[in-house]
Image: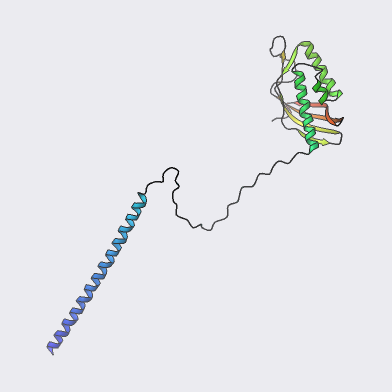
């Protein structure tokens, strides 16, 4: 009996030894696998970090990125084009600009008989300006500079009349023809001054012409 018991105990001991050895081998294999994964990951990271930068003119390869759900960006609104001026309004504004240019042209000579005045103004407006030009010519005075029409707007219009308001910026200065020097106090127009103007137009032979003007200095700004 004792012999059989001893053999059984030896067998049990041998089984336990085998199980322990098996566990050791399994643990060793897992450790080796983990180490291999760590080494492989480190090498992959190093290879990416040491990868050469793309040459000039070449586009770097970027892995695709899955778009996450996000609000759709609002497209910038398309600028609304400026409305086309009504032909009649455009004609009135052109008459306004032409009359201004005619006055500057005549004052720079000076010439009270400048044909541009008759083309752009009625007798009333032309006669008032003509009086000033006659005085300037007699005294040897010319007007140099410009008068910019900053914000012309047609505020009233019929088939034969129109009213235009504007803010005008004047750099007009009177000069002596004899000396070529500015004349102080020779004109009410001040250099670098703003004028709020109201211009009245009437239809003459199918064309709008300036009939009269009211202006106030420093009553507007650009």
Q: Nearer the viewer, residue 34 or 205?
A: 205
Farthest-out residue, bottom: 1
Say if 132 sits above or below 156 in the image: above
Q: Nearer the viewer, residue 129 or 221?
A: 129
> Is 149 on the left or on the right of 55, as rendered?
right
> Is 123 on the left or on the right of 150, as rendered?
right
Q: Nearer the viewer, residue 173 or 111?
A: 111
Horizontal and vertical percent position of residue 26 = 26, 70
Farthest-out residue, top: 178
> Is 53 on the left or on the right of 190, as rendered?
left
Total numbered badges shown on the rendered structure: 0
Q: Quadrant of residue 110?
A: top right
Quadrant, the C terminus: top right
Scheme of colours in the image: rainbow
Say if 129 sits above or below 42 in the image: above
Horizontal and vertical percent position of residue 134 = 81, 14
Q: Quadrant of residue 210?
A: top right
Q: Nearer the viewer, residue 57 or 74?
A: 57
Q: Residue at x 15, y 87 (%)?
A: 5
Horizontal and vertical percent position of residue 8 = 17, 85
Say if 197 sits above or below 15 in the image: above
Q: Quadrant of residue 41?
A: bottom left
Horizontal and vertical percent position of residue 63 = 44, 54
Farthest-out residue, left: 3
Quadrant, the N terminus: bottom left
């Amino acid at each position: 009996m004792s012999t059989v018991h001893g053999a059984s105990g030896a067998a049990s001991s041998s089984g336990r030894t085998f199980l322990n050895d098996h566990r050791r081998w399994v643990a060793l294999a897992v450790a080796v696998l983990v180490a291999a994964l760590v080494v492989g990951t480190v090498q992959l990271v190093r290879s990416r970090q040491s990868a050469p930068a793309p040459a000039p003119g070449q586009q770097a390869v970027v892995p695709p990125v899955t778009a996450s759900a996000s609000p759709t960006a609002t497209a910038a609104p398309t600028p609304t084009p400026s409305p086309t001026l009504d032909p009649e309004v455009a004609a009135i504004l052109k008459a306004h600009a032409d009359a201004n240019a005619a006055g500057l042209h005549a004052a720079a000579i000076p010439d009270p008989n400048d044909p541009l005045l008759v083309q752009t103004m009625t007798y009333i407006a032309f006669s008032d300006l003509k009086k000033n030009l006659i005085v300037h010519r007699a005294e040897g005075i010319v007007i140099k500079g410009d008068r910019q029409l900053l914000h012309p707007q047609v505020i009233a219009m019929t088939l034969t009349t129109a009213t235009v308001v504007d803010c005008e910026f004047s750099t007009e200065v009177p000069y002596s023809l004899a000396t070529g020097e500015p004349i102080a106090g020779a004109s009410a127009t001040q250099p670098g001054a703003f004028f709020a103007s109201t211009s009245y137009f009437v239809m003459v032979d199918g064309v709008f012409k300036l009939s009269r003007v009211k202006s106030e200095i420093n009553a507007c700004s650009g």
